[in-house]
Image: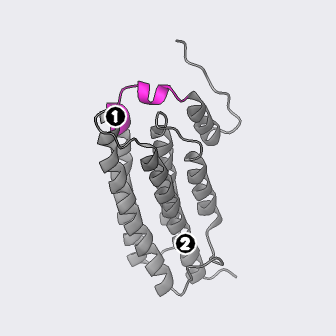
Amino acid sequence: MYSPKINTVSVLNGLALINAERITGYNKVLQLLPDDTTAYHKYARLRSPLADIVRETMKFCRTLENIVLIEGGKNDQNIKVNQELLELAKDIGTAFTGLSKDGFLPACELCEHLSQKAYSLALDQSLQPELYQIVGAQKLELQKSQASIRSLQNRLTPAVNDNNKDVNDDLHKLTNPGKPILLAAG
């Protein structure tokens, strides 16, 4: 029998894993961005919001890990994780694989979409009211991050993302398994 406490711990561990993958992914993106702000002014504008997302996500992760410990769970190699959340975490990790400085924003957008999906899934579980509130508040903050990424995507010139067709194709395959990639007329 699966107890409510074990379910709570596995859901919170899953969200912590989602956030750990976000941190890893966004750190990969930050490492891709050139430091030379004169030559790559458009990338300099990206550093601050992406670094803010990393800091926010680290805070989320610490909060979730502390709650897991309070609930009697563990933060080690043998943790129980909700399987659906585990799959979403793997998808986030995959989204950030093989990036280039010219094609990372679609991966960031996919990450935010998958994070929202994970938090929605967690909120559908039977969480105690105070945990529901914490997870709900984090989800609202994630919506701001998602809007920030969309805004960055919309503000940058199309050249930033058009040059990396392979990454966009991979993201399409990840989010639309079995569906053909439709080529735009150009």
Where does residue 60 sit, x and y in percent of width and height?
40, 67
Q: Residue at x 34, y 34 (%)?
A: 40
Q: Nearer the viewer, mark 2 or mark 1?
A: 1
Q: Secondary structure at mark 1?
A: loop
- Residue 57 badge: none
- Residue 40 badge: 1
Which numbered disc flags the more N-terminal residue, 2 or 1?
Answer: 2
Is residue 106 shown in magenta? no
User: Taking the image as drawn, is residue 61 in sight?
Assistant: yes
Q: Between residue 181 and residue 23, name the one nearer to us.
A: 23
Q: Residue furthest top?
A: 186
Q: CA distance from mark 2 to mark 1?
A: 38 Å
41 with respect to 109 (left or right): left
Circle 2 is placed at which residue position?
Answer: 13
Q: Residue at x 59, y 42 (%)?
A: 98
Where does residue 144 sit, x and y in percent of width and height?
33, 51
Magenta extent: 152-164
**Depicted 155 relative to depicted 26: above or below:** above
Q: Residue at x 39, y 47 (%)?
A: 146
User: Taking the image as drawn, is residue 140 in sight?
Assistant: no
Where does residue 23 sit, x and y in percent of width and height?
46, 59
Q: Residues within 10 Å of mark 2 (few under 14, many from 20)?
A: many
174 with respect to 156 (left or right): right
Is residue 154 shown in magenta? yes
**Depicted 134 relative to depicted 48: above or below:** below
What amino acid is found at the position of numbered circle 1 in the picture?
Tyr
